[in-house]
Structure formats: structure tokens, C-alpha cells
Image: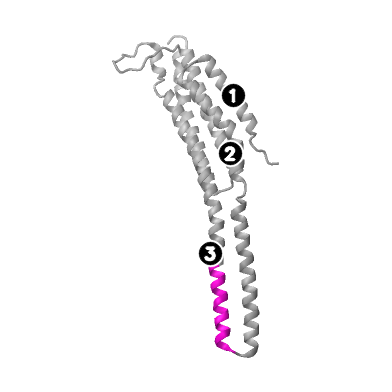
Amino acid sequence: MKIDLQPTLIVETAERLKLRVTERFPDSGLSRVAHSVLEIAREADARSSEIAKPYMLLRVSAWTLGVILIVGLAAAFMKVRIVGSIGNLAELLQGADAAVNLVLLLGAAILSVTKLETSLRRKKALELVHEIKALAHVVDMHQLTKDPETVSGDAPRTESSPKRTMTPFELGRYLDYSSEMLSVLGKIAAIYAQRIDDPVVLEAVDGAEDLTTGLSRKIWQKIAILSEHAKPGR
């Protein structure tokens, strides 16, 4: 039994995450990023479905060219039969050459139209995957300066050091929310993978999922360090 991701459940998860971030860190940059993640989640189902739809104008064009090819070959075949019956070798070869040229030209045209549909679909899908990757990097930038080693207050500061106003608990929640956002972004990318069957798109989606997983792993390393500092006796 095939089990697909449910876009509505991903949207619900993104909505709850946005509320949690906004309630805990109102007017923060992370809350704005959570809103962007929610917007992408809401649009993912419709956008992937729209891209997966057949381009009917291009397909009708390919079918029309195919019909012209069949009719042209039939006409050339009939001409060859008629010419062949009267024994004119030169006209017979001319008719065969015309048939070959017809197959090459219309065959190339049909192939080009078919590839154009794939190219258009791929371009739009890759733009969406790139959007997910870009937002994943934005999430990473927001947690970049959240150093769990500073919670003890013993680390020396410089003039350019970022402000450290969070308690260990708040820092833990901030990092956890960032990790959850990356996880949601990875699931949104997976929606595109299950709707758009293109090897190039699937490879890009795998790259997006690897990116979000790798960034999330770095965050969990920070959370582990933070937990160590929070243990009694430290």
C-alpha cells in the first residue's frame, strides 16, 4: 500500500509551529521566518499540482504533428506503390527520400515539443525547491549566533559579540523551533517529489532534504551541549 504525505497535515504542523514561535518570541526574526514557512506549506499542494498538470497546448501540438507524420507517410507510401507499378526507379527513390525526410523532420519536431513540456515543468519545480533551500539557510542564519556555551555567563565578551539575553530554557526552545522548521521544509520538498516524477527534480528534492537534515543535526548538537550545561553540578 502506497502512503503519501498529506499536505493538509504539514500545513497544520506549520501553523502550530508558527503560533508557538510567535507566542514564545513575539516580534522576533524567527517568528517572521515561521510565517514564511507556513506560507510555503500552504502553497505547496496547489503549486505542485499545477506543475504536474499536462501542458495541453504542447501535447495537442505533438499529437497534431504525429497525425501529419502518419498522413504524410501514408501518402508517400501510396506514391511509391503507384510509381513502383510503372517501373520508374528515379521517381521511386525520390518518393522514398521524401518519406525519410518527413520522418526525420516531424520526428524531431515531436521530440522537441515533448522535451519542451518536460523542460518547463522541471524549471518551475526547481525554482520551488530552490526557494525551500534558501529558506532553510535563512533558518540556519537565525540560530547561527545562538551559542549554548555562553549560557554559563563565563565566556568573555567583545564589543562585537551578539547580545545574549535568553535564558537556557529560552535558548533551548529557540533551537528546537529552528530544528522543527527545517524538518517542515524537508517535508514540503517531499511533496514536490511525490507529485513530479522527474529524475532531475527528484535529485534536487533529495538535496533539499539532505540540507535540512544536515542543518537540523547541527542544531541538535547545540541542544545536546545546552543539556549538558543544564545538568546539576555544572
Extent of the magenta region: 88-105
Q: Can residue 205 be seen in this view?
A: yes
Q: Position of residue 228 (x, y in %)?
A: 45, 16
Q: Is 19 placed above or below 111 here?
A: above
> What residue is drawn where x is 55% and y is 76%?
98
Mark 2 → mark 1, Cα distance in angstroms? 19 Å
Query: Please, what is the dominant secondary structure of the magenta stretch?
Result: helix
Mark 1 → mark 3, Cα distance in angstroms? 49 Å
Given the image, on which type of amino acid does mark 2 rest? Arg
Mark 3 neighbour class, 10 Å CA radius: few under 14, some 14 to 19, many 20 or more: few
Instruction: Give the quadrant of residue 11.
Output: top right
Given the image, on which type of amino acid does mark 3 rest? Ala
Q: Residue 108 carries which label?
A: 3
Instruction: Give the quadrant of residue 143.
Output: top left
Q: Which mark is residue 172?
A: none
> What residue is drawn where x is 62% and y is 64%?
66
